[in-house]
Amino acid sequence: MTEKLEDVQLGGLGWGQLAAGQRIGEISGVFPRIDVKEAVEKIKELEIKATAAQAAILARLRLRLRLMRERSERWQDPDRRLRQGWICAWA
């Protein structure tokens, strides 16, 4: 082809436009092969990171639930509130 790739219009392309014997350059795969060992190592690293992140989220959630439970139990015990002077027994 004598024209630049940027100048080629999709509508103007057709079968058999290349001259016989024309060089088209180096051919390479569109989707290169994946090295299995590298891919498995990368997946394991990502899995470890994801597991650590999930564990951190669960730890924070458990802490919040424990604090909510403690606060709830504190206010549900009327005797405790009496002992602490929050409610006057004679009122």
Image (cartoon, rainbow, N blue to C red):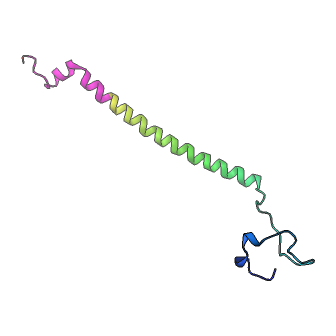
31 horizontally vs 56: left or right:
right
Q: Position of residue 85 (x, y in %)?
A: 13, 25
Q: Position of residue 13 (x, y in %)?
A: 78, 71
Q: In the rendered view of the protein, which quadrant contains the N terminus?
A: bottom right
21 horizontally vs 39: left or right:
right
Q: In the rendered view of the protein, which quadrant contains the C terminus?
A: top left
Q: Position of residue 12 (x, y in %)?
A: 76, 72
Question: Is 13 situated above or below 76?
Answer: below
Residue at x-position 88% and y-position 71%: 16
Q: In this view of the protein, which residue sits in the foreground, 84 or 24?
A: 24
Q: Position of residue 67 (x, y in %)?
A: 34, 33
Secondary structure mostly taken by the magenta-highlighted segment of the chain: helix
Residue at x-position 26% and y-position 21%: 76
Residue 87: say if magenta.
yes
* View extreme (right): residue: 20
Question: Is 7 situated above or below 44?
Answer: below
Residue at x-position 76% and y-position 56%: 35
Q: In this view of the protein, which residue sits in the foreground, 10 or 30?
A: 10
Q: How many numbered discs sit on the rendered protein? A: 0
45 horizontally vs 60: left or right:
right
Magenta region, residue range: 70-89
Question: Is 3 situated above or below 42?
Answer: below
Determine the image quadrant of residue 18: bottom right
Residue at x-position 72% and y-position 73%: 9
